[in-house]
Image (cartoon, rainbow, N blue to C red):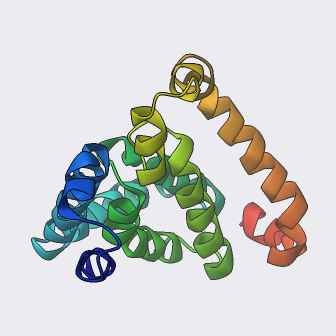
Amino acid sequence: MIGLSILLLLGVLNWEDCLNEKSAWDTLAWFAILVGLAGQLTSLGIVSWMSNCVAKVLQSFSLSWPAAFGVLQASYFFIHYLFASQTAHVGALYSAFLAMHLAAGVPALMAALALTYNANLFGALTHYSSGQSAVYYGGNFSFPSFCLNTCFPNFLAIHCVGLVHSILVYAPAFNINSWSSSLTD
């Protein structure tokens, strides 16, 4: 908003230019609302309540850390359907899920990087999952129909292939050999 105000004050843009960009204002308004909602979920204790519930369920199943890792990663990924913004989702849930990973015994670096990997994939999950997706979807491109008909329905398969690839390529960074003893415990 500061940048827009400066452009208006300097005469680079006039108010009529701003009013003609209805989709930009719409995106900005929805983004602000969604980030605010995520903040309220956190401040009202909904996020901590949810992470406590998930932690209790995982403890009741006595899952090993690799199994807990898989469950938590899948949960973090699919919960994004409840958020329409990557920023809102990460702001509300990243720290809670990182704490759940660490409590389950997942190596800290692996947990942090895997959650970050998932956060980067949200943009392609649906046409409302991130700011850039909303712009593409709202534009008059052939891209939205292609993605709605081709990309989004197949995204789970694309995500799984990418996750397996990342594990195989980046596993040495996590010292995979030390995991074998943890897997048998």
Q: Is residue 18 visible?
A: yes
Q: Residue at x 54, y 54 (%)?
A: 73
Residue at the front extreme of this rendering: 11
Q: Position of residue 178 (x, y in %)?
A: 84, 76
Residue 151 relative to residue 37: left or right: right
Q: Depth check: give the residue in front, 151 or 105.
A: 151
Q: At 9% across and 71% down in the image, what residue appears?
A: 44
Where on the picture, by quarter, is residue 183?
bottom right
**Residue 63, image x and y in percent?**
54, 56
Q: x, y percentage for residue 41?
A: 17, 65
Name the residue at 85% across, 66% down.
171
Number of numbered markers: 0
Q: Is residue 9 above or below residue 124?
A: below
Q: Is residue 171 left or right of residue 46?
A: right
Image-quadrant location for residue 152:
top right
Give the vertical position of 29 relative to 11 (above or below). Answer: above
Task: Classify residue 159 as left or right of residue 91.
Answer: right
Q: Which quadrant holds residue 184? A: bottom right
Q: Position of residue 137 (x, y in %)?
A: 44, 34
